[in-house]
Image (spheres, helix red, strand yellow):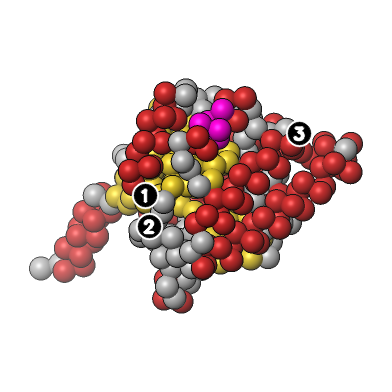
Amino acid sequence: MNYDKIVLFESERIKLTKKVISKSYAKIILFGEHSVVYGQPAIALPLYSVDVHAEISLEPSGQTLSSRYYEGPIADMSNNLLGVKTLIDHILNELGKSSANFKMTITSQIPSERGMGSSAATAIAITRALYQYFDVPLNREKLLKEALIEEKITHGNPSGIDTATASSHFPIWFIKHKENAQITFNLADYNLVIADSGIKGKTADAVSLIARNMVDDSDNTKPLIDDLGRIATEAKRAIITGDGSKIGDLMYQSQQRLHDLGVSTPTLDKLVSTSKKAGALGAKLTGSGLGGCMIALTDSTTTAQRLATELRKAGATQTWIQSFKNYGFNGEKQNDNVVQ
Ligand code: MEV
């Protein structure tokens, strides 16, 4: 009996059926979009109910991608998916697997170009899946570095907050190149209503609009950026102490600054004022603006449901309600930077 042969057959069988699935989340920026690009702090949270899955399975030949935007060989992906293609090629090359045969399937519930971090979550899920598929360990630092390859191509000058949140299991406090920490979130009785304005927001355009104004009109622009940082710092204290009315007030202040920076739109302004009238504690746009989504804070599920209905009547194309019940972070053992 040749036992070596049996062992070989068994490992081949495992290889042939090999399949991995990885996951990442949509992100919502509570405080600090745009100002985070200039070194100010920001607070963001993953949306557990809106996620992306990347599945990789063995194929007899070739490398193919199946997703809502593209179906076919990875080598033939068009330029509007250059970020994703470059990321996949880069990782395969780095892992010495450029000629491996596989099929990658991406399933996403995140609407694209709506400020919910669709591209960042896709980059995180792809990176995790490729490392898992080829059995290569991946720590958080490396994960974020890899995913930024895609974000730099898709968005130009990313702060890194989108990938940091999409890969986290907890709300985060983020300062570009400096801090990426979980924060205690004492808001179990509150809900966030998220509403899609139905208009695509181009992150790269919004980020370059502010970059231009930081140079051409810095006397007006810089104080707004600094003030958004001050608001995020105050909000962190209010989140830790569970002060919902303070957080709401800071959200309205933040919306005013983002409006003054030129990244709100008449539709987003309308959805914010609808929220105020319907009893939200606070409301603001989220993400890059110039379209995309807004968020509103409520202190009861009933108000959240009523508000979601009002927002749809006022033109929102889609709404989500996220309860903060399961957003507690309670200790080192759950640290995203340790556990992957
Ligand atoms: C986009 O989700 C958030 C921005 O602050 C850009 C960035 O931080 O990369 C507008």
Lower position in the chain sequence, tag 2 or tag 1: 2
Q: Which amino acid, by three-letter code, is at mark 1?
A: Ser
Does residue 218 appear to the left or right of 326 in the view shown? right
**Label 1 SS:** loop
Query: Residue 15, position in %: x, y?
Result: 28, 53
In the image, residue 167 lies in the stretch drawn in magenta: no
- Of the image marks 3 and 2, the number of the one nearer the N terminus: 2
Q: In which quadrant is the C terminus drawn?
A: bottom left
Q: Is 93 left or right of 67, judged from the image as shown?
A: right
What residue did someone put label 2 on? Answer: 189
Three-letter amino acid code at disc 3?
Leu
Q: What element carries label 3?
A: helix
Q: Which of 19 and 224 is in front in this view?
A: 224
Q: Do the residues labelled 3 and 1 touch (CB within 8 Å)?
A: no
Q: Which mark is residue 209?
A: 3
User: Could you tell me which quadrant the N terminus lies in?
Assistant: bottom left
- Mark-to-mark CA distance, 3 and 1: 37 Å
Q: Read off the magenta span.
A: 270-274
Q: Are marks 3 and 2 in contact (CB under 8 Å)?
A: no
Q: In which quarter of the image is residue 34?
A: top right
Question: Which class describes the residues within 10 Å of circle 3: few (<14), some (14-19), or many (20+)?
Answer: some
| 36 left or right of 246 in image | right
* Number of the label disc, if any, that sits on residue 300: 1
Instruction: Select label 3 or label 2 by which is in front.
Output: 2
Amino acid type indicated by mark 2: Asp
Identity of the residue drawn at 77% across and 46% down: 224
